[in-house]
């Protein structure tokens, strides 16, 4: 929140100040703000319990907090909490203690001792899609929807929240496929236009999306909607439902649903594209990533079996 300094700030009207604060409040996506709030509340509750100040926090406070947290939480959680604490200090015009050499050294030690390897959900690879799609009963309204969700989610390499946020008006069909305006992402605040090309087979995301819109008789509003057990269409689908839909067809295809989730479509497109030799830039265009760090994980996984030295055994 921007607070005017009467000594140095020109006399802005209340309407102007409200507009400035409105834009500042929209500098982060809603999901990011929810995460920051939850993490910050956890830290302030801990500070209250230990009778120390959360803002501005001392370096020692952060070190004690992280050390205690390291006993029960994953390293990725600690890293996220630090980001939230840092953001709170930045927004309050305080120097963040999380940037101190002591905290950096502590995090390095925790990472080495506990390890920072995550166990992400498995990627749904390109070759897995036919197995999943073959299990979908497209004679039902839910089946037509689910086929569109899986194929479009894969083609867009989208997050669950992005997929369910798409409206019918966000789609623009043309001769080569369609453009999709994607919003509410973690890495950017403006809409990202993603292209999806036609496929001349049963796994075309454009055709599947058109079939869903036509079958459900959609003209505007949410693209993907919940359907009750009687086949009645309701409101916008929740992001958790995306994960449940994926798990359902993964299980029907004979795979372990515990190993897959909502992120499996996003990682699946990225890894499959890397296996086919597509560049980091091409993959980042579709995923919406701003940096190569996360994309590099997909590329490394995708290229692990390309030109692999162990393939010499095929010559025996």
Image (spheres, rainbow, N blue to C red):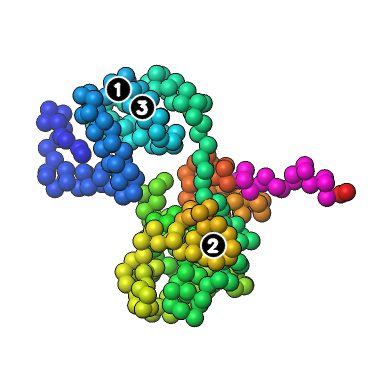
Whether 235 is drawn above or below 26: the answer is below
Residue 248 at x, y = what percent? 49, 64
Q: Quadrant of the N terminus?
A: top left
Question: Is residue 204 visible in this depiction of the protein?
Answer: no
In this rendering, the answer to whether 239 lies above or below 91 is below
Q: Is residue 314 visible?
A: yes
C-alpha span from label 2 to label 1:
45 Å
Q: Which residue is mark 3?
A: 68
* Residue at the image point whose x is 37% and y is 21% from the top: 100
Q: Quadrant of residue 21?
A: top left
Which one is in front, 279 or 316? Answer: 316
Q: Nearer the viewer, mark 2 or mark 1?
A: 2
Element class at badge 2: helix
Q: Is residue 312 magenta?
A: yes
Residue 263, how many percent across, how many down?
Answer: 48, 53
**Local SS, label 3:** helix
Q: Main secondary structure of the magenta part?
A: helix
Which residue carries the number 1 mark? 61
Camera-nearest label, 3 or 1: 3
Residue 148 circle label: none
**109 to the left or right of 27:** right
Which residues are drawn in magenta? 299-314
User: Which of disc 1 and disc 3 is earlier in sequence?
Assistant: 1
Marks 2,1: beta carbons within 8 A: no
Q: Is residue 300 left or right of residue 59?
A: right
Q: Which mark is on residue 250?
A: 2
Choose the circle earlier in sequence order: 2 or 1. 1
Distance between mark 3 and mark 1 Cα atoms: 11 Å
Q: Nearer the viewer, residue 150 or 75?
A: 75
């Amino acid at each position: 929140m921007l607070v005017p300094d009467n000594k140095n700030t020109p006399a802005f009207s209340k309407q102007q100040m409200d507009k400035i604060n409105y834009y500042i409040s929209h500098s982060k996506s809603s999901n990011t703000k929810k995460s920051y709030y939850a993490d910050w509340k956890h830290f302030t509750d801990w500070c209250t319990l230990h009778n120390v100040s959360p803002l501005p926090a001392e370096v020692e406070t952060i070190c004690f907090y992280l050390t205690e947290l390291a006993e029960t939480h994953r390293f990725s959680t600690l890293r996220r909490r630090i980001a939230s604490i840092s953001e709170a200090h930045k927004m309050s015009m305080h120097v963040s203690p999380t940037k101190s050499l002591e905290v950096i050294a502590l995090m390095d030690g925790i990472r080495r001792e506990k390890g920072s390897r995550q166990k992400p959900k498995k990627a749904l690879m390109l070759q897995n899609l036919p197995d999943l799609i073959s299990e979908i009963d497209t004679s039902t309204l839910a089946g037509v929807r689910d086929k569109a969700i899986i194929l479009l989610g894969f083609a867009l390499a989208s997050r669950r929240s992005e997929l369910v946020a798409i409206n019918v008006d966000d789609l623009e069909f043309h001769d080569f496929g369609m453009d999709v305006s994607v919003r509410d992402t973690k890495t950017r605040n403006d809409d990202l236009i993603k292209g999806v090309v036609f496929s001349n087979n049963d796994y075309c995301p454009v055709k599947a999306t058109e079939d869903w819109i036509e079958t459900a008789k959609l003209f505007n509003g949410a693209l993907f909607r919940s359907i009750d057990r009687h086949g009645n269409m309701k409101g916008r689908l929740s992001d958790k439902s995306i994960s449940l839909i994926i798990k359902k067809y993964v299980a029907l295809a004979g795979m372990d649903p515990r190993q897959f989730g909502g992120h499996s479509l996003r990682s699946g497109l990225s890894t499959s594209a890397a296996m086919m030799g597509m560049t980091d830039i091409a993959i980042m265009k579709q995923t919406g990533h701003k940096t190569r760090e996360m994309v590099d994980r997909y590329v490394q996984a995708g290229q692990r079996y390309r030109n692999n030295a162990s393939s010499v055994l095929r010559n025996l």
